[in-house]
Amino acid sequence: MPRYEFECATCGRTFEVTRPIAASGDPATCPDDGSPAQRLYSVGGVFLSSRKDDGRRSRTPADADARAEAAAKADARADAAGAPRAPGHEPA
């Protein structure tokens, strides 16, 4: 069950309450003085990526050149090893 963090409106104490998600919006009271408590929201786990803010990968010409170079190197390694090429990577 998830844990939710609250802060007492009177004494300022922070505390956690374990409850089902369906009860996440229910009010909580301070365990010390019984005053109403305000739910606190915090940042959970954060995933950082190399993608731009709009969620798409950069598509500059330099990126396309780098991808083409990497594909050519992979094809050369496969040819040297006698491995079959991936579909779409057959020699022209």
Image (cartoon, helix red, strand yellow):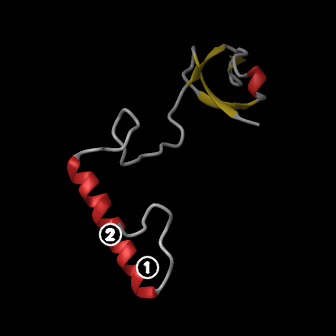
Q: Quadrant of residue 11?
A: top right
Relative vertical location of residue 29 with respect to residue 62 in this rendering, above or below: above
The amino acid on which the numbered mark 2 sits, given as a three-letter code, is Ala
Relative vertical location of residue 10 with respect to residue 31 in this rendering, above or below: above
Q: Furthest-left residue in view? A: 62
Q: In the image, is 50 to the left or to the right of 31? A: left
Checking the image for residue 44, the label placed there is: none
Relative vertical location of residue 12 with respect to residue 46 in this rendering, above or below: above
User: On the rendered image, what quadrant is the C terminus found in?
Assistant: bottom left
Comes first in the chain, label 2 or label 1: 2
- For the image, the number of numbered tags is 2
Which of 27/2 is in front? 2
Which residue is at 30% across, 44% downward? 58
Q: Which residue is mark 1?
A: 78
The picture places residue 36, in percent across and down from the top left corner, at 66, 12
Q: In the image, is 31 to the left or to the right of 50? A: right
**Mark 2, other Cα within 10 Å: few <14 / some 14–19 / many ≥20:** few
Which of 57/83 is in front? 83
Q: In the image, is 89 to the left or to the right of 36? A: left
Which residue is at 47% across, 72% downward? 85
Q: Furthest-bottom residue in view? A: 81
The amino acid on which the numbered mark 1 sits, given as a three-letter code, is Ala
Mark 1 lies on a secondary structure that is: helix
**Mark 1, other Cα within 10 Å: few <14 / some 14–19 / many ≥20:** some
User: On the rendered image, what quadrant is the N terminus found in?
Assistant: top right
Cα separation between marks 2 and 1:
10 Å
Mark 2 lies on a secondary structure that is: helix
Which residue is at 49% across, 67% downward? 86
Which residue is at 30% across, 61% downward? 68
The picture places residue 47, in percent across and down from the top left corner, at 47, 45
Q: Which residue is mark 2?
A: 72
